[in-house]
Image: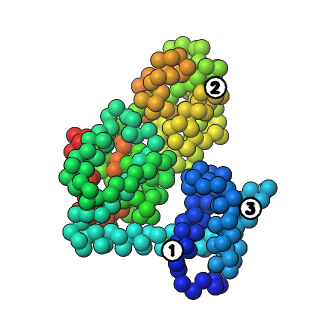
Amino acid sequence: MSKLKQLSDVDLKLLRVFVVIVEQGSFTAAQGQLNISQSVLSENLKSLEIRLGMRLCERGPGGFRILPEGKEVYAAAKRLFSAVEDFKSDLMAAGGGLAGELSLALEDDVLTNPASKIPNALRQYVKTYGNRVRLKIEVMVGFHVLSKVADGAAQVGITVAVDKTRLRGIQSTPLFKETLHLCCAQGHPLFSEKNATIRRENIGDYHYSSRGHLEPENFAGTLKFDNAEDVGLGAQAHLALVLSGRDIGYIPSHVAAPYLTSGELKQLGGDDVSSVNDVVAIVRSKNADFKLIQHFVQLLEAAHR
């Protein structure tokens, strides 16, 4: 049982640090996310454990491992921060929803898609509300966008649409399409072959960079990959794996374009093996009617018509 009887601002700060460490899976990754040194991270975690009166995780040469008590504290902290965001949203609604903060989570590389009109919507939003609204924008991999919105840490997310079963309690609005090309790089056995000689049924025999458990069914159409051991979380991660020369993988067309032009990448097959996905704006269903959130989604939708 925790010996903590009352929460202070310090406790909230330490809990937020702990949540990031757990979600990043290591001190090194959390260090980059929080922009603080590993020694400070370690001191923060030690302070939290002292204040709670329990060990939350093991760390050392063997790496980071969360303990059962840590899992309970993590789940409770997520509920706490979600409740705080709900409270802020309720206050915003009580005040007419015309002032406050709008937090936006963007999947990496959707902003640079030529079809993206996100800056247009932001420009109109700022013009409408001026200094009455504070904007907070964070870029991350797609599954973090969904998690941030579901937990209430972000009010609006913009991400590539995922399997509908992962969108319970989430309302989505289609914005534009993202085309992904199946590519390989110099050094790959298929790089020097002409597309006309590459048999479609043989493509699946090569090493493939997947999205792991986050890859939706039928993402690759009718192609089946037997060697999907490498995982790239985000467009740039996929690009790095493909550029290694070992993997083939789906790269957003606008990300692949300069490498295709320079000859470092090769597109495999034609449009029949490309993948086209919706990029959507997502909000929690319970927050969809709050004016600041609703208006921004409407501006996004209008900008992409």
Identify the residue shown where x is 31% and y is 42%.
118
Taking the spot 63% from the left edge, 72% from the top edge, the residue there is 48
Would you say 34 lies left or right of 131 here?
A: right
**Dot 2 corresponds to which residue?**
245
Circles 3, 1 touching at the beta carbon (< 8 Å) = no
Q: Residue at x 47, y 58 (%)?
A: 147
Callout 1 amino acid: Asp
Identify the disc placed on residue 9. 1
Identify the secondary structure beneath mark 2.
loop
Q: Splitting the image into 4 quarters, where does residue 206 fall?
A: top right
Structural distance between the alpha carbons of marks 3 and 1? 25 Å
- Amino acid carrying label 3: it is Arg
Distance between the Cα atoms at labels 2 and 1? 49 Å
Q: Is residue 24 above or below residue 226?
A: below
Check the picture and name the quadrant holding the N terminus. bottom right
Q: Name the mark nearer the viewer: 3 or 1.
A: 1
Q: Answer few, some or many: residues within 10 Å of disc 2's Cα (few below 14, many 20 plus, some between 14 and 19).
A: some
Residue at numbered disc 3: 59
Instruction: Please indicate whether residue 52 sits to the left or right of residue 131 in the image.
Output: right
